[in-house]
């Protein structure tokens, strides 16, 4: 009986599964695909910490060509806020319908968040790619995915990737500079119009 149990134990041990090897990603090719992407939507949570003080909110970012339409709702020191960034600049609209544009909008956004935010570059960083036209340094993991990106004085750390239409995209990232830190947790990516 003992011998039968020993054989059964060894047989079961041999059935243990070995975790699959990480899939290597051709991120250079993926980066080119993402640069060509004109329309996408990301929903999730954002947490902003500035010099130890922080808050979080829900975020809904819709990118259509060069126009970013960003809705933030929650405590984040802003209540409900909609930001539209396009070729003409930044426009902000709060929950009461009050609007501010241009340099005043950028100043107000920095004031409400407690730090200047790299909204123009963030559009690219959320996709896991550097903003075009600016020098950068990038570190990749052994499987080819970006781990760390330094650009325009900011450091972007990609801590997790997840499945998205057409391939993988970041689902957890942290953007930091000086005393400011922005953490994004993506719950859904939609690619296309």
Image (cartoon, rainbow, N blue to C red):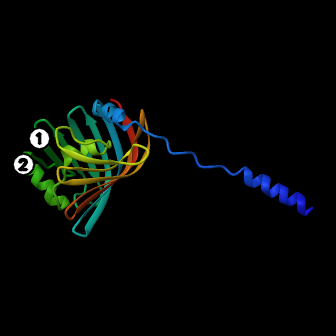
Question: Observer-nearest residue: 93 or 55?
Answer: 55
Circle 1 SS class: strand
Q: Is residue 117 left or right of residue 88?
A: right
Q: Is residue 152 left or right of residue 42?
A: left
Q: Where is residue 164 shown, x and y percent of the image?
A: 43, 38
Q: Residues within 10 Å of mark 1 (few under 14, many from 20)?
A: some
> Measured along the vertical axis of the image, is residue 175 above or below residue 23?
below
Which residue is disc 2 drawn over?
103
Q: Residue at x 25, y 42 (%)?
A: 130
Q: Say whether disc 1 or disc 2 marks the residue closer to the N-terminus.
A: 1
Q: Is residue 83 visible?
A: no
Q: Give the position of the C terminus as an image quadrant.
A: top left
> In the rendering, at what x and y percent does residue 179 appear?
21, 65
Residue 8 percent location from the top left of the image: 83, 55
Front-most of residues 34 and 134: 134
**Above or below 174: residue 37:** above
What is the CA distance from the residue labelled 1 to the residue labelled 2? Answer: 8 Å
Are circles 1 and 2 on residues that touch, CB within 8 Å?
yes
Residue 127 visible at all: yes
Local crowd at mark 2 within 10 Å, few (<14), some, or many (≥20)? few
Residue at image point 25% right, 54% down: 155
Left or right relative to 142: residue 110: left
Identify whether 65 is placed above or below 182.
Answer: above
Q: Which residue is mark 1?
A: 89
């Amino acid at each position: 009986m003992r011998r039968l149990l020993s054989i059964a134990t060894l047989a079961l041990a041999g059935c243990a599964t070995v975790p699959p090897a990480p899939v290597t990603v051709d991120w250079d090719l993926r980066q080119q695909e993402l640069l060509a992407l004109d329309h996408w939507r990301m929903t999730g949570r954002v947490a902003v910490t500035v010099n130890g003080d922080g808050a979080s909110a829900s975020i809904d970012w819709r990118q259509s060509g060069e126009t970013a339409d960003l809705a933030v709702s929650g405590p984040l020191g802003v209540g409900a806020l909609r930001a539209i960034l396009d070729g003409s600049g930044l426009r902000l609209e709060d929950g009461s319908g009050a609007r501010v544009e241009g340099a005043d909008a950028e100043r107000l956004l920095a004031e409400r968040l407690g730090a200047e935010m790299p909204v123009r570059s963030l559009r690219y960083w959320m996709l896991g790619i550097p903003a075009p036209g600016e020098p950068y340094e990038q570190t990749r993991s052994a499987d080819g995915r970006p781990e760390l990106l330094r650009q325009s004085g900011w450091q972007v750390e990609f801590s997790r990737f997840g499945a998205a239409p057409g391939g993988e995209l970041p689902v957890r990232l942290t953007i930091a500079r000086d005393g400011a830190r922005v953490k994004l947790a993506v719950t859904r990516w939609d690619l296309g119009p």
